[in-house]
Image (cartoon, helix red, strand yellow):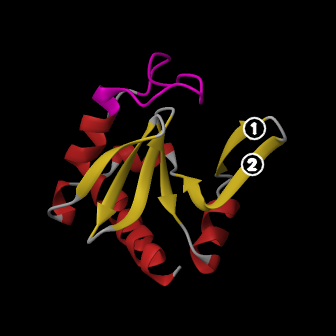
Amino acid sequence: MPYPLNDAIKRDMRMSASPEFIAYVRDQFTPLGNLEDGSFFGGFAFKYSSKQFAMIMGNTLYFCVNDESRIKYKRLGMEPFSYVTKKGRIQVNKYYSAPEELFEDQEKLIEWANEAIESAYSA
């Protein structure tokens, strides 16, 4: 059953990840096996064998990308993780937002997660 991405879930990017969304993503990642996860700087990280491959910031799931996989994300119009400092907006091109359609198909979500795990190890 897809997670309802209603207005309450689509919060301002500056807000911390909701516990409900974290629990939902954690549940969707169950087929990946025993993952490590935890909070950091208002967000939430998912690790596979100590390598961070995904994070949730502001209730958006971001996957780790490499030079090859980044092309797919850009082609789909996905955005890199970014944040604002006193000096301006910083883009973190190592993490791109996951397409919302993935939440409608757990098998596809796991495919993308596995690609993100590979990207984390190739970086």
The residue to which callout 2 is attached is 90
Residue 107 in sight: yes
The residue drawn where x is 36% and y is 57% is: 109
Q: Main secondary structure of the magenta part?
A: loop
Give the vertical position of 111 relative to 101 (above or below): below
Magenta-tinted stretch: 5-21
Q: Position of residue 87 (x, y in %)?
A: 84, 41
Residue type at tag 2: Ile
The residue drawn where x is 44% and y is 43% is: 56
Residue type at tag 1: Thr
Of marks 1 and 2, which one's residue comes earlier in the chain?
Answer: 1
Instruction: Please identify, in this view, whether the residue under mark 1 or under mark 2 is nearer the observer.
Output: 1
Residue 8 highlighted magenta (yes or no): yes
The residue to which callout 1 is attached is 85
Instruction: Mark 1 and mark 2 in contact? Answer it, CB < 8 Å.
Output: yes
User: Residue most toward the front?
Assistant: 86
Residue 66 or 41: which is nearer the viewer? 41
Q: Position of residue 85 (x, y in %)?
A: 75, 38
Give the CA distance from mark 1 to mark 2.
7 Å
User: Residue most toward the bottom?
Assistant: 122
Q: Position of residue 91 (x, y in %)?
A: 72, 52
